[in-house]
Image (cartoon, rainbow, N blue to C red):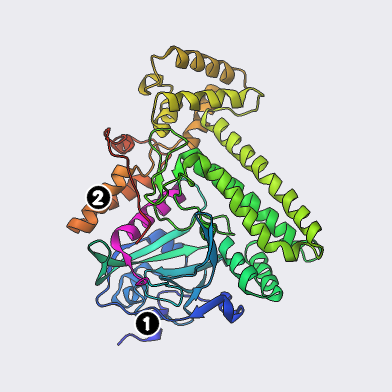
């Protein structure tokens, strides 16, 4: 029988600050044990950074923890309560199939959430079984780790274990549990929940907790809650710009899927765009295109407005002045986002300084990309290596004229051509998680039990800016199809 002493060798170092918040914020509960857990994949570099021993995690005792069958010393499992606007409609939510195992204090003194996703029913399950299927959990592992490698703020994936039990969806599927690592799981929806069902004192406690955890440099003698709003706005403006620059489409930008920390969270029907088109939608449930690629900055602003509404009682005692402060803060989001996006686009084109006509140059390129239905990632990759013939735009008089303007623009900057290309190499990935490659890996894993395809994909995606010969085959777009690619919420 496993002892807590044996489990402690793994390196768990919990301090559970969320569990010390008002009891209405969460429900304490242990995971539901599973029949026969088996480790499928472990993120060893991430484990090391968390202060965890990878070999101990791979042991029978370690896998029992990752499956929720055993609780390590110091853990305090709980399901968090939150609310959210789902496709614009407000509802009570909560961790319906996930449990916060605890907060790990890393060797660097950082505090991160360790969450088990698919660990059984909670009081917030709303009729669901609380479980998860293997395919979606592996999908989150692949995409979240790819996002990390791209340099985009994100939750991360520590491990996936199978449960030895089926989950029942349209068909029987192998069950699995993902171990997710996050700066925290505080969401816009967490604040909406407390603002709607808690007290004014509860709201202040939550805001103070968020400030202490994510913005400790904000002093107590300022309007701390206005600064909280402003800092969250800044982080989201930077995050969404990074999404747009690599063609990432989240797919379900509900307010419960926006993290206060500024990390990308909740990988469900997410995917990366191949052909450039602002109207691109992959999610099967987004029938109106609310969360289309081109709408993501606007939805982020909408979500932040809901965050500001939740904070109004803290911004000022006078309601009208509170609204004015919130509106002034929110008005900065569009400017901040645009500044981040434009800076990133300049880097993608090797422009190290600023000129007034840069945005027109960028927009013209994007218009051509949409008009000629060319691959977003590979177009910038071709430009990076001065190989315009490798893009479908080549041969068009319109593109030839644009290319000449771009070369003239690069020639007017102080940076050398080599420095310009180095900037482009660091800003334009050679590979992204191509949808057909992700599906290929998931099919092989779930249907055939062959994880080698996924492991090879993860290896390639781990260095997206390497531009190595080995990555070439993973840069190939999918074959043309009359059927649009569709993704589904993780089940």
Outermost residue, left direction? 448
Magenta span has 135? Answer: yes
Q: CA distance from mark 1 to mark 2?
A: 34 Å
**49, 74: nearer the viewer:** 74
Q: Earlier in the sequence, mark 1 or mark 2?
A: 1
Task: Say whether residue 26 is left or right of residue 437.
Answer: right
Q: Tell me which residue sits at (70%, 71%) in the image.
A: 204
**Residue 185 visible in the displayed image:** no
Quarter of the figure with residue 460 = top left
Q: Position of residue 320 (x, y in %)?
A: 80, 58
Task: Say whether residue 448 is left or right of residue 190.
Answer: left
Label 1 close to label 2 by CB (< 8 Å): no
Where does label 2 land, which residue? 453
Where does label 1 land, which residue? 6
370 vs 96: above or below = above
144 vs 186: above or below = above
């Amino acid at each position: 029988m496993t002892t807590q002493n044996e489990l402690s060798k793994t390196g768990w170092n919990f301090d559970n600050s969320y569990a010390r918040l008002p009891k209405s914020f969460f429900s304490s509960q242990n995971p539901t044990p599973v029949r026969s857990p088996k480790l499928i994949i472990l993120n060893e570099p991430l484990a090391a950074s968390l202060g965890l021993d990878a070999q101990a995690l791979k042991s029978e005792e370690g896998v029992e923890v990752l499956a929720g069958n055993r609780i390590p010393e110091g853990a305090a499992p709980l399901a968090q309560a939150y609310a959210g606007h789902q496709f614009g409609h407000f509802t009570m939510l909560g961790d319906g199939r996930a449990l916060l195992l605890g907060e790990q204090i890393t060797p660097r003194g950082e505090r991160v959430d360790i969450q088990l996703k698919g660990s059984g029913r909670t009081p917030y399950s709303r009729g669901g079984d609380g479980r998860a299927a293997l395919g979606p959990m592996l999908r989150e592992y692949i995409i979240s780790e790819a996002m990390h490698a791209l340099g985009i703020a994100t939750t991360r994936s520590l491990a996936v274990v199978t449960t030895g039990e089926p989950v029942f969806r349209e068909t029987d599927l192998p069950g699995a549990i993902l171990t997710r690592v996050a700066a925290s799981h505080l969401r816009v929806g967490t604040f909406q929940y407390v603002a709607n069902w808690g007290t004014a004192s509860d709201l202040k406690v939550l805001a103070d907790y968020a400030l202490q955890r994510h913005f400790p440099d904000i002093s107590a003698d300022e309007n701390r809650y206005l600064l909280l709003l402003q800092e969250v706005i800044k982080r989201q403006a930077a995050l969404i710009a990074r999404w747009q620059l690599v063609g990432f489409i989240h797919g379900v930008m509900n307010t419960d899927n926006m993290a206060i920390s500024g990390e990308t969270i909740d990988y469900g029907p997410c995917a990366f765009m191949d052909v450039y088109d602002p109207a691109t939608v992959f999610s099967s449930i987004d029938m109106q295109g609310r969360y289309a690629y081109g709408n993501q900055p606007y939805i982020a602003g909408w979500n932040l407005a809901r965050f500001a509404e939740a904070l109004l009682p803290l911004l000022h005692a006078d309601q009208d002045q509170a609204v004015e402060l919130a509106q002034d803060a929110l008005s900065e989001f569009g400017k901040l986002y645009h500044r981040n996006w434009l800076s990133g686009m300049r880097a993608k084109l090797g422009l190290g300084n600023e000129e007034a006509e840069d945005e027109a140059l960028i927009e013209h390129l994007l218009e051509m990309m949409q008009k000629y239905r060319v691959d977003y990632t590979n177009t910038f990759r071709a430009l990076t290596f001065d190989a315009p013939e490798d893009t479908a735009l080549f041969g068009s008089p319109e593109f030839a004229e644009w290319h000449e303007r771009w070369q003239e623009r690069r020639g007017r900057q102080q940076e050398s051509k080599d420095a310009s290309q180095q900037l482009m190499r660091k800003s334009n990935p050679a590979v992204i998680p191509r949808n057909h490659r992700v599906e290929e890996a998931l099919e092989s894993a779930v249907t055939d039990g062959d994880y080698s395809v996924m492991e090879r994909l993860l290896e390639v995606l781990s260095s997206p800016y390497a531009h190595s010969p080995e990555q070439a085959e993973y840069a190939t777009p999918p074959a043309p199809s009359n059927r649009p690619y569709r993704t589904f919420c993780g089940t």
